[in-house]
Image: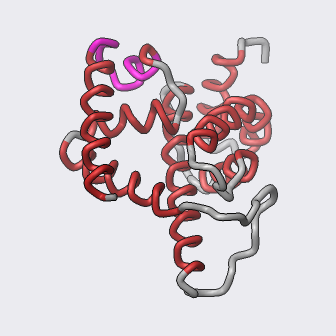
Amino acid sequence: MSVGPSGEVTQLLAMWADGDRAALDQLMPVVYAELRKIAGGYVHRERGGHTLQPTALVHEAWLRLVKQERPAFDHRRQFFGLAAQVMRRVLVDHARAAKADKRGGGLAAEPLVDIQMPDARPTDLLALDQALTRLARHNARQARVIELRYFGGLNVEEMAETLGVSPATISRDQKVAEAWLGHELADAS
């Protein structure tokens, strides 16, 4: 393919949506660096001692993404937005499992590559996930803005294009959502 990276991603996503599972083999190397950047940014924002490393997060998210039978993406930003949601789910599931293990629940899961096991703080991620879920019931777009920004690593212009609103609306939504989440998380602690 002689199209640029953005066009190549869109083209490979369309091929995948048309049922060409081989397009996944071509897609992974093209999107890996961006997925790793998103995962690294998210893990970096976590508190110290987080046990899931960016590489393992990308690999687990990829495994969940490719299970889709008929994905439908209009453009690469939708794909990366979904990837951000999947990464959030992976992190929340990981935090829940760590919290359950601390309480003696269940057998220890087989660790993923790059996982370290020192003092994790899964309750912080769980509280954030619960607060984002409550925010989504109150204002779905504000929750999506936070998800795209902090889990997906999108900038204001990319979020505006993805959500079909103006950059000013995105900025307002982000400020309001951050304030709302700050209040919710302060009350939870």
Q: Position of residue 35 (x, y in %)?
A: 66, 36
Residue 83 image point, x, y percent: 56, 42
How many marks do you count on the picture?
Answer: 0
The answer to which quarter of the image holds residue 94 is bottom right
For the point 55% across and 34% down, the residue is 80
Would you identify the image quadrant in which residue 112 lies?
bottom right
Residue that sits furthest to the left in the current view = 138
Instruction: Return the x and y of residue 4 as percentages of the image width and height.
Output: 71, 12
Residue nearer the viewer, 83 or 117: 117
Q: Is residue 97 above or below residue 170?
A: below
**Numbered range of the magenta stretch:** 158-168
Q: Residue at x 57, y 57 (%)?
A: 90
Instruction: Examine the structure image and report whether residue 164 is included in the region drawn in magenta.
Output: yes
Q: Is residue 105 part of the magenta span, yes or no?
A: no
Task: Name the image quarter holding residue 109.
Answer: bottom right
On the image, the x and y values in percent for residue 154 come to: 51, 25
